[in-house]
Amino acid sequence: MKILVAIKRVVDFNVKVRVKADGSGVETANVKMSMNPFDEIAVEEAVRLKEAGAATEIVVVSCGVLACQETLRTALAIGADRAILVETQAELQPLAVAKLLKAVIQKEQPRLVILGKQAIDDDSNQTGQMLAALMSWPQATFASKLKVEGDKAQVTREVDGGLETISIRLPAVVTTDLRLNEPRYVTLPNIMKAKKKTLENLKPEALGVDVSPRLTTVKVIEPSRRKAGIKVADVKALVEKLRNDAKVL
Amino acid sequence: MSILVVAEHDNKTIKKATLNTVAAAQKLGGEIHVLVAGHQAGDAAKAAAQIPGIKKVLLAEAPHLADFLAENVAALLVQVAKSYSHVLAPATSNGKNVMPRVAALLDVQQISDISAVESADTFVRPIYAGNALATVKSKDPIKVITVRTTAFDAVAASGGSASVETVSAPADSGLSSFVTREVSKSERPELTAAKIIVSGGRGMGSGENFTKVLEPLADKLGAAMGASRAAVDAGFVPNDWQVGQTGKIVAPDLYVAVGISGAIQHLAGMKDSRVIVAINKDEEAPIFQVADFGVVGDLFQLVPSLVEELKK
């Protein structure tokens, strides 16, 4: 079974983002970039499936600027076999990414596609579901457990109020939640090995996909800051404040 | 202009998230219909018909709609959505699962998790864990939207009298099937609907301490219990307790953060609470920058004495 994993290069989760002064977006120049954490979990899950003998090949795909190659190399160092960059300078929204991934899937014919449930930059939480729709495949989002059995997969999902298990027919799309696994650290020998793995470069035009954005960003602002309150000496003072000043008790 | 709100329900009652979503729909202006998709969901449809300002309730019933499987619900929605200018669902796990599938099938770009309506085609949504707010304008003919429920005050649940109309559901896709559900059993209010939330972080030290130290406080306050990602990752409590960017977004009247340092990802999930209390031994902890009232000290002493003080 071939697995395709889609990954996104995002501002590192430890970076405190700053809104640009002109309100056009968030400052991304000279900021540390990393693989979206949920996508790292997706790559790890694919590698574990391969190690367990359930998968034969892992292809990682990223859509975006040339620098996404670094992110793809990280995925190769975790254990993916080869990488594809769909290179474009254009702003990509989830629907466009789903269309690009569909085109790649039609070339690669994987049985399983794994993605992070959401990217920590735009927080959209859409691409996996959209891809499943465009392929007319089943989807299992927010996965915390994944078991492949023949032509089906059993997936436990993180849902409001608990867990839900569904069975999906393959080929299918799975999106990862936090507890699916804990990604391994990449080792130096694996980073060296990753440099020798194939990284193919494609263009949206060659795939015949129109990626023009459907949403226009009018402006980006900083949210109003919550004012820091006061420190109280003890719980007696706290209860007094909550009862009499804030009136929440 | 007509607006369809996809109801969050359990086949019998309508969940509060639906009422928040109707509130967002009202800001658009236009006739509002509610879709109840489920199995033997007549009672839920009746409840939806009570929501003031709703013109019509569409009820789609089928055994394969019982568990809200994305493939089946999306197929239904695509069929229904074409007569609407806007389709809205709450950004619950159901809404987040189904709506992007609907959007892609309609070839439109969904607008996720809106926190304000500027006009019929322009919306505000938080990005980067709420560290920035983007105003976006959609060019698509049908706006497919999920709604951040905490950003819109719920409309009343009763007082209206909409008609209920039955719509037929497409056949079972056969692509997926429901196996089982493990619902966390709790006598407590639901995290996203609670008026008071008591939340613990890594500082709690263990799952046992959540039970021994934090639970009595939650009991006393009639509060829901939450946790930071650090506490979930450490295995202290289940993931559905997680408050933050990748967990639940909450905005109760009172949020008590105990042993939570206040990483931006956590603040993203609770900073719109009306009153925030922080109990932490580190007086430099970022949580104090958003807390209305902070107490610096050992939580294992402070929390039990807080419980005692509340009894007075």
Image (spheres, rainbow, N blue to C red):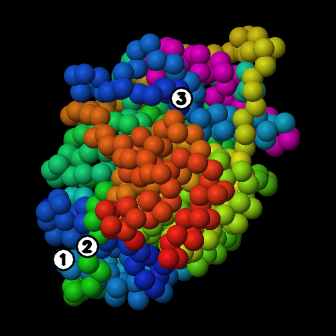
In the foreground, B173 or B217: B217
Residue designated by label 3: A14
Indicate the position of residue A156 as horizontal and vertical percent values. 68, 59
Which quarter of the image is occupied by the N terminus of chain B?
bottom left
Indicate the position of residue B219 as horizontal and vertical percent values. 57, 74
Reply yes or no: does residue A226 show up in magenta.
no
Q: Are marks 3 and 2 on the same chain?
A: no
- Disc 1 marks a residue whose amino acid type is Gly
Mark 3 secondary-structure assignment: loop
How many marks the image carries: the answer is: 3
Reply yes or no: does residue A72 show up in magenta.
yes
Residue designated by label 1: B53
Characterize the local packing of mark 1: few (<14), some (14-19) or many (20 or more) Cα atoms within 10 angstroms: many
Mark 2 secondary-structure assignment: loop
Residue designated by label 2: B155
Mark 1 secondary-structure assignment: loop
Chain hosting mark 3: A
Characterize the local packing of mark 3: few (<14), some (14-19) or many (20 or more) Cα atoms within 10 angstroms: few
- Disc 3 marks a residue whose amino acid type is Asn
Chain hosting mark 2: B
Indicate the position of residue A29 as horizontal and vertical percent values. 40, 15
**Mark toward the start of the polypeptide (2 vs 1):** 1
**Mark 2 touching mark 1, by CB under 8 A?**
yes
Q: Classify residue A143 as left or right of residue B13.
A: right
